[in-house]
Image (tube, rainbow, N blue to C red):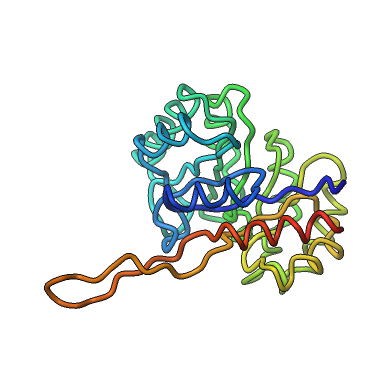
Amino acid sequence: MSNKQLEICVGSWDSAMAAQLGGADRIELCDNLAEGGTTPSYGMLLKCQKTLKIPFFPIIRPRGGDFYFSNDEFEIMKEDVIACRDLGCKGIVIGILRKDGSIDTERCAQLIDLAKGLEITFHRAFDRCSDLEQGLEDIIALGCHRVLTSGGKENALEGLEVLKSLFIQAGSRISIMPGSGVNEQNLAQIALESGAHEFHTTAKINVEYGIDATTGKKYSMMETSTEKVAQLKQILSQI
């Protein structure tokens, strides 16, 4: 049996349920996926905690854009970590950089301390680091459990050579989790060549939600597909 795990990034309740039904091992829970993901609402956190049977890790990110946060934004992030911890979440997803492109180890350490034993994923802020090798060492020193990365490239397939190098550098100290552009066409190649054991994707399709009765405009959203998740899990089971 394969020991490889599939994390699905979701931005809605429907997508969270689809990920679970498809056999996902874990969910990264976000709002505003078009902005790269921001912290989900308290109501969403509570609903997931009461209903989901698989772990979900909320992202702690107060806005889209860069990963340099003001003091006020950082205070919001700390309160969000406390809320996730007190609700019983199994983990959180964080990432803060300094203006020079290095990992903001001091602020990240404060969030990790507040999380009090939750699993910690460092998100793709890592791919904006000025020095990926040093950034990885900083993240390992912080005690993070995994780092989500496309190898500093637009997507994981383009960053495959860097992902291989990061996997070798990491050894058994941290999990390198390829993400961005991972799909049913390239998952097997990325898994086999990177050496990674965890993989991250949205597995999404376009879903129509109805038509505005006044304007006739059709509404649609990108949502996670149960079938795609199941297909990705099947691919991993054969590696």
In the image, 163: left or right of 48? right
In the image, 197: left or right of 155? right
Whole-percent x and y of residue 223?
A: 47, 61
- Residue at point 53%, 52% (across, down): 18
Foreground pick, 11 / 157 = 11
In the image, 234: left or right of 169? left
Whole-percent x and y of residue 100?
A: 56, 56
Using the rendered view, name the quadrant where residue 188 is placed: bottom right
Residue 21, above or below 80: below
- Residue at point 58%, 22% (across, down): 116
- Residue at point 58%, 45% (across, down): 20
Residue 94, above or below 83: below
- Residue at point 62%, 71% (across, down): 154
In the image, 111: left or right of 157? left
Foreground pick, 235 / 152 = 235
Foreground pick, 94 / 197 = 197
Among all residues in the image, which is located at the extreme left?
214
Among all residues in the image, which is located at the extreme bottom?
216
Whole-percent x and y of residue 30?
A: 46, 49
Specify the quadrant that holds the C terminus: bottom right
Number of dots carrying numbers: 0
Whole-percent x and y of residue 106?
A: 57, 35
Residue 70, above or below 90: below
